[in-house]
Image (cartoon, grey):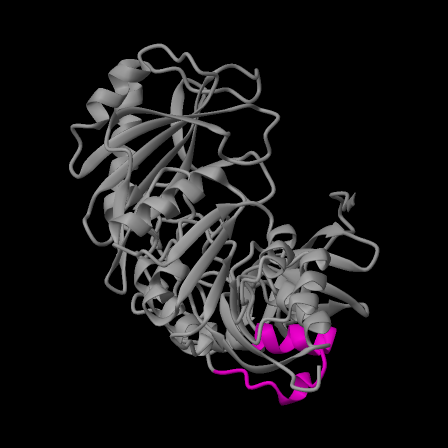
Amino acid sequence: MTKFTKNKQEKNIIITIKRLGINGEGIGYYKKKIIFIPGALPNEVVVAKKVDRHPHYLEGELVRIKEKSPDRVTFPKGVDPAVGGLELAHLSYPKQLEFKQHLILESLRKYHPRDYIKYKVKKTIPAPNAWNYRNKAQYQIEFNKGKSKLGLYAPNSRRLIDLPDMPTQTEETQKVEREIKKLIDKFHIRIADFRRHTDGIKTIAVRQSNATGEIQVTLITIGKKIKDLKLLASHIMKLPNVVSVFQNETQWQNPQVWGNKTIKLFGKSHITEEILGKKFKLSPRAFFQLNPEQTTTLYSEALKYLDLTPDQTLIDAYAGVGTLGILASDQVRQVIGIESIPEAVIDAQENCRLNHVRNAEYIQGNVEKLLPELKNQGVPINALIVDPPRTGLSKKLIKTLLEVKPETFVYVSCNPATLAKDLVLLSDAYDVRVIQPVDMMPQTPRWEGVTKLVLRKNK
């Protein structure tokens, strides 16, 4: 990356925006080179300044708008636009939904899996609430220049943006975050310092159950022994709806927010969420969608497209805490869930007991290894559902699927690019019947969708 030098020759430029990029930034052209300008919308004429030059593209910064798009709406007041998670907050919600349908269409055109022109790509299902929907907050905390600050890092930086309000977050989780910061200040609890690499609290994670209102707090720390941490935790337990406080220990070298070791300081071991009449206990590290209302929609679509029958065995790959498998258990003979994280498997097994599900089994391991073993043991693999991370399915797993050949399966994806890329290989044996985008995260370019695949009869 080459930084532009600041000199008199560097002047503002006028750009006409042609379309939106996958991260929600405006895209235009300057001297036949593509330029990305966050905050700009299609058909707008904007004044921008060049920020970074790359071999094949430029990055720009929006200065002002000369000709405004009719689809532009007012950005939330009191929030720094640089904070992540609001990349589309200046775009009207109907147009956000169109953009997310367009994302998968563009990805299909880029990777062109077999017969992609014939795919039925439905309109994006809107969220019931486009604001205040996130029920989990992970705010960073730091102490600098004599005072503490709580918020989120600006994208690709260590610059912490103070967040008095985050309009996509539920008010209850934000309120608890702010009260915890006050308690940290009151009791002079040590805050981790990445500049000096000293121990202390690094991140405050707050998750609330939409079904019960219970709030689970996790203090993510650098180092284990933080002075007066239990004193802090005891006062956090007095906050409204807080039912548990945990400590998660990590290290500066860990690129992830969470470390591997979590201990309970006070309260319940789990909070309980409810989806489609089934209950799910969630430990602090358990994955669960951040938009509870729209999760019901996503999983309902997935179950609908699985089109299950009572004689089938369903493989729930990347099973997490067992959500999809347990929801489907009433419709099939047997559910086998596969999950690599031990704590999630324990949660899934507990969730089976909680819902009196006796035909579901959850095992720890890698899907690509266990699927052939199950088939060799005589397990009929009729139906499959996969819900992988953003990286999609590994080539090894796709090879396994093409060997095992479940008759029908549903792919729940959170990345249109990796979905389209995976379909190139999967379409060697499968026909894609439908792709249904679901807006899980309004105001962001994040995409989620359900794809129904059916085994081609001549394969």
Q: Is 167 on the left-hand or right-hand side of 25?
A: left
Magenta segment main secondary structure: helix
Residue 388 higher or lower than 217, as above or below: below
User: Which corner quadrant holds the N terminus?
Assistant: top right
Q: Nearer the viewer, residue 15 or 75?
A: 75
Q: Residue at x 63, y 89 (%)?
A: 118
Q: Nearer the viewer, residue 112 or 252?
A: 112
Q: Is 28 on the left-hand or right-hand side of 160?
A: right
**Residue 71 appears in the rendering:** no
Which residue is farthest front? 378
Residue 229 higher or lower than 82, as above or below: above
**Residue 407 appears in the rendering:** yes
* x and y, in percent, of residue 151 in the image: 41, 37
Q: Quadrant of residue 235?
A: top left
The magenta stretch is: 102-122
Q: Residue at x 65, y 65 (%)?
A: 401
Q: Nearer the viewer, residue 304 or 52?
A: 304
Asked if residue 68 lies in the magenta stretch, the reply is no
Q: Is 416 on the left-hand or right-hand side of 292?
A: right
